[in-house]
Amino acid sequence: MLTNRFAAALMLAAGLLAAAAKSGVPELFAKSNLVAWCIVPFDAKKRGPEERAEMMHRLGITRFVYDWRDKDIPDWDREMDALAKRGIKLHGFWTPYPVDAAKPSKLPQIVELLARRKIRTELWLSLGLDKSFDALPDDQKVEAAAAAVTRVAREAKAIGAKVGLYNHGGWFGEPENQIEVIKRVKMPNVGIVYNFHHGHDHISRFPQMLAKMQRYLLAININGMKMGTKILPVGEGDQELAMLRAVVASGYRGPIGILGHREDLDAELALSLNLKGLEKLLPALRKD
């Protein structure tokens, strides 16, 4: 009888493990699939490239998106060297770009760096929109945004890079508008980087919206979600578990970004809080 019970328990455990593996939860939220984001300007310790790479290595994070600021430009090559030394992949490069082609941008410098270093990555694109853009009707907004995205996408294609449209608020931050832009651009290297922390207005319709943008998704950056609080560690909100359940159920298996984004905190602590919060939610996600 004991043997039979033991065998039954083994079968049950094997079934649960198979179900968890089938769900994709372990792979989706494994450290190897996590991307560090918002840890350059948002770091109370103001780390330099070598210290930042060492910190990610210590946490076991192997992917990083570089959210530089103008003061960091002289250190771009040092940043690439530090990442390479620690075996950390440059998963993306923050790319602000004006919708007005006549205005200057750092895109040429970014492209030159990546081409010279032979780095294939993603350009996480935030369009700079002015008051004249805001006054346009929606169809003209799509046309103007598509023209700007096309310019970036052509430069990206030349160096083997992808372009991720970044929801950073405003008209361009609405996924439905981004989808219309992508359809107008008609280039296969353009997709969407979706951010929980810029999506509080989307919570009530997140599963439906996720279904619309899933085919375009390059990355999802997660955050603790609670109305009235923009930045919160994962696991401390009251909405992110339902949103993560929707992500798992959708079949999305791409990269998951975890945030620093706290100027008042050591970036290592901010990332650690998100890692611990995600670990806290995993049992509930595995049950589904």
Image (cartoon, grey):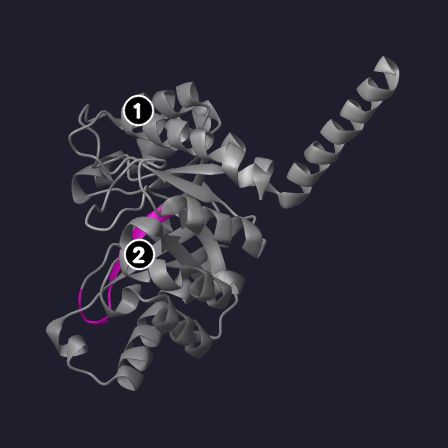
Say which amino acid is labelled 1: Glu
Report the side of 102 relative to 85 (left or right).
left
Q: Is residue 59 magenta?
A: no
Q: Which residue is mark 2?
A: 199
Report the side of 220 relative to 30 (left or right).
left
Q: Nearer the viewer, residue 169 or 90?
A: 169
Calculate the distance from the C-alpha at mark 1 to the C-alpha at mark 2. 24 Å
Mark 1–mark 2 CB contact (< 8 Å): no
Say which amino acid is labelled 2: Gly
User: Is residue 166 visible to the viewer in this orientation of the structure?
Assistant: no
Residue at image position (35%, 22%) is 55
Residue 38 placement: quadrant: top left
Magenta highlight range: 93-103
User: Is residue 228 visible to the viewer in this orientation of the structure?
Assistant: yes
Q: Quadrant of the C terminus?
A: top right
Q: Which residue is mark 1?
A: 268
